[in-house]
Amino acid sequence: MFNTTLPKTTWYRWAAGLCLMAGLSVASAAYPERPVRILIGFTPGTTGDVLLRLLAPKLGERWGQPVVVENRPGAGSSLAAEAVAKAPADGYTLLMSTSANVINASLPNPQRVDFVNDLVPLTLLAENPVVLVTSGNSNARQLADLIGAARSAPARMSFASSGNGTFTHLYGELFNLSAGVKLIHVPYKGSTQALSDVMSATVDVAFSPVTPVLGLVKSGKLRALGVIGRARLPDWPEVPTLAQAGIAGFDSALWFGLNAPVGTPPDVAQRIITDFQWALSQPDIQAQLVAKGIHAMPMGTGVFRELIQREQAQWVRLIRQANIQVD
């Protein structure tokens, strides 16, 4: 029996709450009723794109709806983030986010979108260790050789990046500060030409996600000197992490997560989180990710939000210390 002695205002609020919960449950049960779009701010073939295209068919089977991967490169992933932030908050337009989005939010220049406040973190998906590479013909056989050469010839050696303000740029500046060296920054419009010029020794070193350089290191065109991540890579057990080599500040690898517009219904958000984490747990997906050097890291909203906040504070400090200016 209903408690008819409740004040009218309390009754109305309680009844409204029941209706809202019922509506959310229906929304969750029905979701998705049409194709789901996931935007990524980088070109096809990049690590996040590879990850997303592995997961999309698995989710499509589970949902009974197409999962459409849409590449929206530009402005360091800000174009994709802006499009998702402006989309209806219904769970049908999502963002494959990366460390690049946190870096953009940390830069001093005005951003197209406030990644921290205009988008809701749903779940961390995976991470890709980052490696410091040099030419396969370089005299630097290990990290100590590079640091010694750079200290003996300040501002004579260089590092390539995929552009001003990118994570490969900021990792290079962090390396300068932490290792006590001065490598000159050489920005490129993307990673392909940057790595090509490292292979030819036009530029001395570069930081890169491990996936694009796996084959190049195995073939001897590039040499891995150090790893950014929690542990050494199984394929290259002789290559230390930068932390093991005494270079502080390199604690987190390049990560990939999932974000939605602010206001996405909680039940829908939880359905998305649960199903993405299920997809990552499938043995066939895990085997393919391992082969590509990608580590599944399914973590919930709270952990993901804390990671974003921690990294933003780290990048803001670095940008100020290194006086990084991005046009």
Image (cartoon, helix red, strand yellow):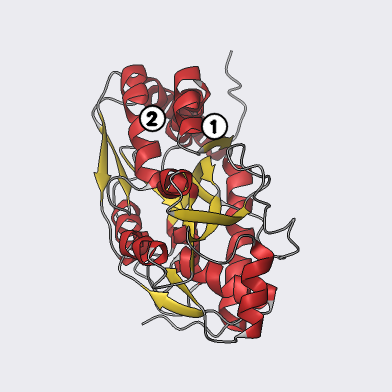
Q: Residue furthest top?
A: 1
- Left or right: 244 as drawn, with respect to 143: right
User: Which class describes the residues within 10 Å of circle 2: few (<14), some (14-19), or many (20+)?
Assistant: some
Q: Residue at x 37, y 27 (%)?
A: 27
Specify which label sits upstream in the sequence, 2 or 1: 1
- Left or right: 319 as drawn, with respect to 60: right
Residue 296 position in % (x across, y down): 54, 34
Q: Nearer the viewer, residue 5 or 203?
A: 203
The Cα atoms of the two marked residues, 2 and 1, are separated by: 40 Å
Callout 2 secondary element: helix
For the question of whether residue 259 can be seen, the reply is: no
Amino acid under label 2? Leu
Q: Residue at x 43, y 38 (%)?
A: 265
Marking on residue 14 = 1
Q: Which residue is mark 2?
A: 55
Q: Which quadrant would the C terminus be assigned to in this image?
A: bottom left
Residue 15 position in % (x across, y down): 49, 29
Residue 160 position in % (x across, y down): 43, 70
Q: Residue at x 27, y 46 (%)?
A: 44
Amino acid under label 1? Trp
Answer above or below: position of 103 versus 244: below
- Left or right: 327 as drawn, with respect to 233: left
Quadrant of residue 191 within the rendered picture: bottom left
Residue 165 position in % (x across, y down): 43, 72
Answer above or below: position of 167 versus 295: below
Q: Are marks 2 and 1 in contact (CB under 8 Å)?
A: no
Q: Which quadrant would the N terminus be assigned to in this image?
A: top right
Mark in the foreground, 2 or 1: 2
- Left or right: 34 as drawn, with respect to 156: left
